[in-house]
Image (cartoon, grey):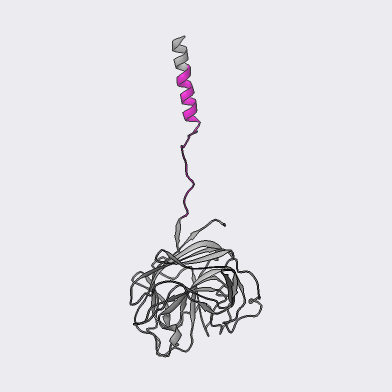
Amino acid sequence: MKVFFLSLFFLLLIAISGSGIQEVPNAKPSEPQWIQLFNGEDLSDWDIKIRGHEMGVNYKNTFRVEDGLLKVSYGEYDTFKEEFGHLFYKTPFSHYRLRVEYRFVGQQVTDGPGWAFRNNGLMVHSQSAESMGLHQDFPISLEAQLLGGADEGVRSTMNLCTPGSSVVIDGKFREEHCIDSSSDTYRGDRWVTAEMVVHGDEVIHHIVEGDTVLTYSRPEMGGGAISGYDPEVYIERQPMKSGYIAIQAESHPTEFRKIEVMILDPE
């Protein structure tokens, strides 16, 4: 009888192991992963739109990849004639975390506007490159304005500018074009880490070197500060729930060594 029960026990063990059933104690859901938008090699997956030129024309090689860096370059320009440029990632996003590492280098191109000195931007919830007008200056979007410090004075980065958009801050509707963040001033050619946490049209946070420097909510179209756009694209008071990510070219050389996103669940 003892032999019978031992045999039965071993048969049950074999049956259970053969079924493929495994118990994983304290299993945790997979963590969100960073997705690299810039591959360090080329501009595949990105669309170029420079003012006065058709989509896809990389006028004077403004956007380029060299030494593993994405560069906004003016090496082939003699002067700047308001050829504002934007480089759009191919896929729209809604709820996500965006992180970049950037720096300003060299001198501003001749005839670049004074306000564009050490100035670039991260455009989010943007219209597509295809929908921009031939002579449109800036896309309808929310811009996290990247600024580098001058030799003296305070100049915050990751400010908010609102080309064709408006937001709510501390319960108040805000339509002024640019709103300063509370960040430090970053001078010289040091690398700066900037992030955005975007939750559709609910809330958006700007983060610099780990510190939250600006928060706003309820973005929608409106406010002006753009020209040359297609009126059918610009719909006053339409909530901005999703859109494209773009970086700018506004006349000052800029380098990016990382551009990545993490997809988030809706809050």
In reply to whether residue 125 is colored magenta, the answer given is no
Residue drawn at the location 40% of the way across and 75% of the way down: 64
Residue ID at (65%, 71%): 238
> Residue 195's spot in the image, x, y percent?
45, 66
Q: The magenta stretch spans which residues?
A: 8-32
| Residue 17 part of the magenta segment | yes
Q: Position of residue 165 (x, y in %)?
A: 59, 75
**Count of numbered labels shown in the rendering:** 0
Asked if 81 appears above or below 169 in the picture, the reply is: below
The image shows residue 46 at horizontal and vertical percentages of: 48, 70
User: Residue 252, image x and y in percent?
Assistant: 40, 82
- Residue at the image position 47 percent from the left and 89 percent from the top: 81
Quarter occupied by the C terminus = bottom right
Compared to residue 110, the image places residue 219 above or below, namely: above
Q: Write the residue at 48% across / 34% down.
A: 23
Would residue 39 appear left or right of 173 to someone viewing this image? left
Please name whichever residue, 169 or 121, is drawn nearer the observer in this view of the structure: 169
Q: Is residue 102 left or right of residue 171?
A: left
23 and 119: which one is in front? Answer: 119
